[in-house]
Amino acid sequence: MSQEQSSSGAVTARVVIVGAGFGGLATAKALAGSEVAVTLIDQHNYHLFVPLLYQVATAALSPADIAEPIRHILSGAPNVNVVMGRVTGIDQGARQVLLADGSGIAYDRLVIATGSTSTYFGHDAWAPHAASLKSLEEARTIRTRVLQAFERAERTQDPAERARLMTIVVVGGGPTGVEMAGSIAELAHHALARDFRHIDPTTARVILVEAGPRLLTAFPEALAAYALGSLERLGVSVMTGQAVQDIDAEGVTLAGRVVPAATVIWGAGVRASPAAGWLGVTPDRNGRIPVEPDLSVTGCPDVFALGDTALIRDAAGEPLPGLAQVAQQQGSHLGRALREALTQGKPLPSFTFQNRGNAAIVGRHAAIFDFGRGRRLKGFPAWLLWAAVHVVLLVDFAQRTRVSLQWLWRYLTYRRGARLITAPPAR
């Protein structure tokens, strides 16, 4: 059987969504309340607001501020069933999603929205020494390493070791690296400034390394130049044209020179989840699954892919970027389209992305916004807009209230209340 009976006795199509990120959650919300039986699968029980993950890593917010239980979000959607489980494969012949516990979940339509992971470009040995930022666990790891380094610097009597402990290197000059470097500089130079007795946190070095000729290549050069100036005013040392040669427990090697650093943060690259292997399709070099204009996977009937997992091009032939707004728009579009197709027999329309602007925050008063077609914003107005947009995008009213109040408190006092070390002390 490929369909089930609804409570009213009608035959109901089954849609299975893998991944409760922006794309998967938007799809489920668009299908909520319909005569479609929806199953949403995720390996976690929460939806994570990834754009603010760096603020957890730098003690500005707590995990609960940016994560919300999936069941709570969809509690008003009786036709949506939530399953916590890890997907290991897809049996297209049997139309089943295979889970790690050995069970399978049948589907009539399958939506894959499994996001992306960090890539070290073939240098996986760097991973233990350079934490990436794609999950709450990684955010906590970064926060712990940064704070532990200052604690160890407080106790050491060796000036060279103290300098190494108080050096943080961020690799990658995209939005993640820029936002992380600026936030760590503010943490060290302001929030921690009066917390220690034997070290001066304001002397900490924050180094941002980018292999390319400039930062933020997805933004116009004028905005990237403004971001560079803002980072330098925060005390961040920016090194462009510097490819990383090695990362180990002692620090980073650049152009044959070792930069001693106790904390290295990786923000240099992402790769799509392994979903292409589940389907047996050939991905692009970043692991993305080619999809048709209606978001269906090329060569895979009744299977769709969204967000960072999908390769879809805009009118100019360029791949759509891996942004939350892209995944969210795709999910809302596909959910509505599937709802109409399965309940009214309508054909699936093509997806069109509406660019609402690309943004990056650079510090306390500074941000950049690129709306396209020459429309740009920078400085304090851009920072206010960035804050407003991110608060609105949070899924829960309580989260919006908490984050707004914490940002206001930080702005007025320079303090950060989430400076907790939750891992065993380093040896």
Image: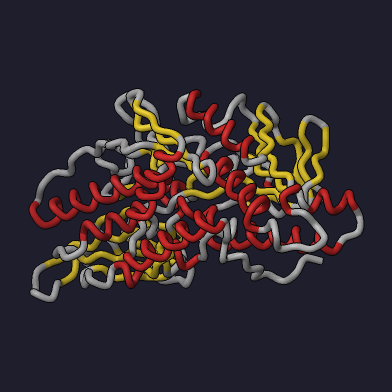
Left or right of residue 339: residue 316: right
Q: Residue at x 35, y 23 (%)?
A: 374
- When asked about the image quadrant of residue 78, the answer is bottom left
Of residue 321 and residue 361, the one placed in the foreground of this image is 361
Q: How many marks?
A: 0
- When asked about the image quadrant of residue 34, the answer is bottom left
Of residue 256 and residue 66, the one placed in the foreground of this image is 66
- When asked about the image quadrant of residue 292, the answer is top left
Location of residue 345 in the rendering, given as x and y in whole percent from the top left corner: 9, 51
Left or right of residue 275: residue 252: right
Left or right of residue 280: residue 150: right
Location of residue 198 in the rendering, given as x and y in whole percent from the top left corner: 82, 60
Q: Residue at x 77, y 54 (%)?
A: 200
Location of residue 64 in the rendering, given as x and y in whole percent from the top left corner: 46, 68
Q: How is the image coloured?
A: secondary structure
Q: Residue furthest right?
A: 158
Q: Is residue 315 above or below residue 124?
A: above
In this orientation, does residue 281 appear? no
In this orientation, does residue 320 appear? yes
